[in-house]
């Protein structure tokens, strides 16, 4: 039995185990049947652009990305040494987030540009079904107040369930102080934000559906010396 004689349903199951980049590079233009499977029947693309060559990245974005915008479920982008400037390159193509109507999850690694962060945060508000947002090993040298304002606005995302913010401000510690109430966020993790008890109480009031919380909590004794420690809080289900 050859690979091409397998039933469509079985081929679609096999596709689930391949990265989107490899899948389209190997099977696109093989024949009309595979083209139909890739662009009509296959419904969920998870794009992970870490550890991809610049050539493969550009080919994918130019040839394939416009044809699958309505079926992209998740995107992972990184600006590390292996994929420098990948986030800016992705945003430079003629694709805006509002076209990604099925996008549920975004992971951003090693972002250092405040301009790109502001653009990403603005784009996120064009995604009606975004449920998971992760910033991992990101670091910013300046415009900390602007970044904090953008992160506070995450509470305005109507479907956001889980948010992880591993963001370093070069030794300076800030807090997320949302002004809006989010009834959708259930899991929140921050690495570089330090909360006192009053700020924590405000955060909980603005996030009433929270079930999991990982934060840096500051104790405030009478001598005004701050003790930093990490705590995890699980809220009881109602």
Image (cartoon, helix red, strand yellow):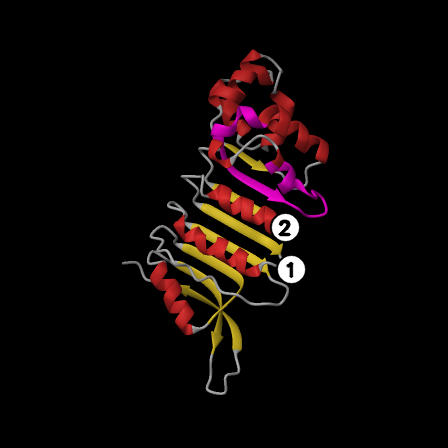
Instruction: Estimate the x, y position of residue 72 in percent, counting from the top left.
Output: 50, 33
User: Horizontally, is 155 left or right of 51 in the view?
Assistant: left
Bin the neighbour count of mark 1 within 10 Å (Cα to Cα): few under 14, some 14-19, many 20 and up: few
Q: Quadrant of residue 144?
A: bottom right
Q: Relative to residue 8, is residue 117 depicted above or below?
A: below
Magenta range is 65-91
* Disc 1 secondary structure class: loop
Front in this rendered view, residue 45 or 124: 124
Residue occupied by mark 2: 113
Q: Quadrant of residue 66?
A: top right
Front in this rendered view, residue 211 or 77: 77
Q: Relative to residue 21, is residue 132 depicted above or below?
A: below
Bin the neighbour count of mark 2 within 10 Å (Cα to Cα): few under 14, some 14-19, many 20 and up: some
Which numbered tag is attached to residue 141? 1
* Disc 2 secondary structure class: loop
Regarding residue 110, the answer to whether it shows in the image is no
């Amino acid at each position: 039995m050859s690979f091409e004689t397998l039933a469509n349903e079985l081929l679609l199951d096999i596709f689930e185990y391949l990265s989107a980049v490899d899948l389209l590079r190997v099977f696109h233009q093989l024949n009309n049947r595979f083209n139909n499977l890739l662009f009509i029947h296959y419904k969920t693309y998870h794009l992970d652009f870490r550890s991809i060559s610049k050539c493969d990245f550009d080919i994918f974005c130019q040839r394939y990305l416009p044809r699958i915008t309505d079926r992209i479920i998740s995107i992972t982008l990184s600006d590390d040494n292996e994929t420098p400037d990948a986030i800016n390159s992705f945003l430079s193509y003629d694709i805006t987030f509002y076209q990604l109507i099925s996008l549920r999850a975004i992971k951003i690694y090693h972002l250092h540009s405040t301009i790109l962060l502001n653009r990403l945060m603005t784009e996120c508000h064009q995604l009606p079904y975004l449920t998971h947002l992760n910033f991992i090993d990101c670091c910013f040298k300046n415009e900390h107040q602007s970044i904090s304002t953008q992160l506070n606005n995450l509470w305005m995302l109507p479907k956001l369930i889980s948010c992880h913010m591993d963001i370093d401000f070069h030794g300076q510690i800030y807090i997320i102080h949302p002004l809006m109430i989010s009834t959708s966020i259930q899991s929140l993790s921050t690495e570089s934000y330090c909360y006192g008890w009053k700020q924590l109480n405000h955060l909980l009031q603005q996030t009433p559906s929270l079930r999991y919380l990982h934060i840096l909590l500051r104790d405030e004794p009478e001598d005004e010396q701050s003790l930093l420690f990490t705590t995890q809080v699980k809220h009881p289900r109602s």
